[in-house]
Image (cartoon, rainbow, N blue to C red):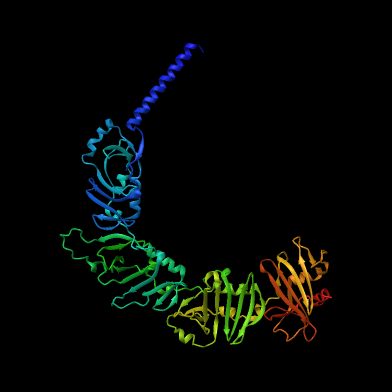
Amino acid sequence: MSTRSLLLLAALVAALSWVALRQKGLEDRTRFHRSEPLLGALEPERIRSIFIDHTMTETYLGFENQGGLWSLTDPIPYPADAASVRSLLAALDQPARFVPEGAAAGYDAGFRPPRATLRIVGEDAEGQAVEEQLELGPFDVDGMSQVVRVRGETLLILRNLDTLLDRPLPEFRSRRILRMDPESIVHLRRTWTGPAGEVDAEFSFVAERRSGGWSLLTPRRTTLDPFGTLLWLKALGQLQVGDFIWDPPTDPEVLVLGPPLARYGLERPQVELEWRNGDGRAETLLLGKHPETGRWFAKRPEGDHVWALGESSNPRLFERWQEFADRALVRVFRADIEALELLQGDAVVTLTREGSDWSLSRREGDSEPAALGPASTAEVERVLGLLENAAVESWAPELDPATEFPEGAPRVGYRLVTGAALGGIEQRGWLGEPRLGADGTSLRPFLRPGDGLVGWLDASLADALLTDAESFRSRDLWEVEEVELERLVLRSGEVQREWLRRQQGTWHAAGSDRSATELLSVLDPLLFLRAEELLPTAPDALARVVEVEFTGRRGLSRRCVLGLDAEGLPVVQLPGGAAARPARASLHADLEALLR
């Protein structure tokens, strides 16, 4: 390329750079194509009130933030719809494009008058009052944007703000009736009045939430279904205003005669709902049903607003109280159960969880419990499964608990206890005498102690609760994981021998490095201690007693004794008194041989 061409190319690049810099300087001075916050330094979260004079719809709206909650102040004092306020604040938080002065003059006619004028009051970061006035003008030629004026400048924004404001007043009013969080409610009262003014006991109730869950206090004390009650509270929280029927006049010169309550069935409300949270704050709602349309109308006792409930109002709010009574017998997870007591008349069979295993004991009358050794996990799981799947088939409010379950009479029933981590929650139930139902099936009355409502259960559950203690006894006396063990001690009189387990998994006698091959014949029978026969009681005395003790990591400890009874037969006895014939008849002799 020639020198002349290079000089011409360099001159062209320099000229283009000068034009670009000049254009950038012009755009910087005029803010051409630059976006900036519509409200300048006023941040949406610092806005305290918004007043809207809408010329096109001839309406005036006022919103105020009162303690974090937005309310309408004009044209009627009323809680504002939270979603509408969020949308309004988001529309005010949008970026705006600057319109140069020459182009701005062409929009003057669209501001005489403006479509709407917004006065926005807030505060800056230092807490000083800030006020902005925003005028909405004509739409841009693209139909997507709108020209606005604020702080003496003309800007372009999206037309979503104008669309949002072009809505009727009811859409800015909150349709939510419940003012508090449903999960904070601890007290419920529903009073249902019949046609003659009497209280309808089928639908009226008082319920409270306490540490053990929800309970019905009246008309019958009973435990409530926790999930059903949760759904009831959810339905209460979702109770919506369908239509705003009547509002008190806001003009002080207008004579207020009150709403025509008789027209909406509210002169004598059919239903009165009251709920209260843990802080003692209460709300009450009066409900009336139109005799012809069947539609529900509502108002608060302290206010004159009348609403028609939404068509989607949950019918669960109007069900009989018996529908909320808890039909399930067990409301805890099986893994959390630490003990199960089976009430069998004068006897009590107790199953206690010990890690992943269960132990068994039986008490007769007022005597001390007799330990019966390990319980069959499969048998315990079977009974727990029947309890978990059992449910009250129907309620019998006509039955008297005192008559069906006389004071001091022997009981058939159950008692479940959870671990300390759950506060030792108890769940109990009693079964009464069997009788035939209307369809010929065998039923038993059911009652939770402390409740006043009797139900009907399938009588077959009693068979599981009356399972004999011997049926729970397990022939697997224990099973120890060898990898958890560190030490084995055998004792007989004054003779004691000790073996230690290395990390490699081999055993050696204490004080010796030689592998303890002498343990090979007895180690598995001791690790998996099984019974050939379970003895009903322990022998009075054992001869030639050998004590066995395993210890291991994390406090693992297993102990038993083996000896000979009066007939010379081997017996293994566990702590607590449970006794059995060992599955390996030579185990006692083999252990004696290790002590010689």
What percent of the width, then of the height, locates residue 383?
A: 59, 75
Using the image as rendered, state which of residue 61 and residue 544 is in the foreground.
Answer: 544
Relative to 370, residue 49 above or below: above
What percent of the width, then of the height, locates residue 345?
A: 57, 85
Asked whether, in this view, residue 331 is left or right of residue 498, the answer is left
What percent of the width, then of the height, locates residue 155?
A: 30, 37
What percent of the width, then of the height, locates residue 3?
A: 49, 11
Q: Is residue 87 visible?
A: no
Q: Is residue 407 visible?
A: yes
The answer to which image quadrant residue 159 occupies is: top left
Which residue occupies 28% across, 37% down?
A: 153
The answer to which image quadrant residue 233 occupies is: bottom left
Task: Classify the position of the C terminus by image quarter.
Answer: bottom right
Using the image as rendered, state which of residue 75 and residue 310 is in the foreground.
Answer: 75
Count the marks. Answer: 0
Relative to 154, residue 390 above or below: below
Relative to 29, residue 71 above or below: below
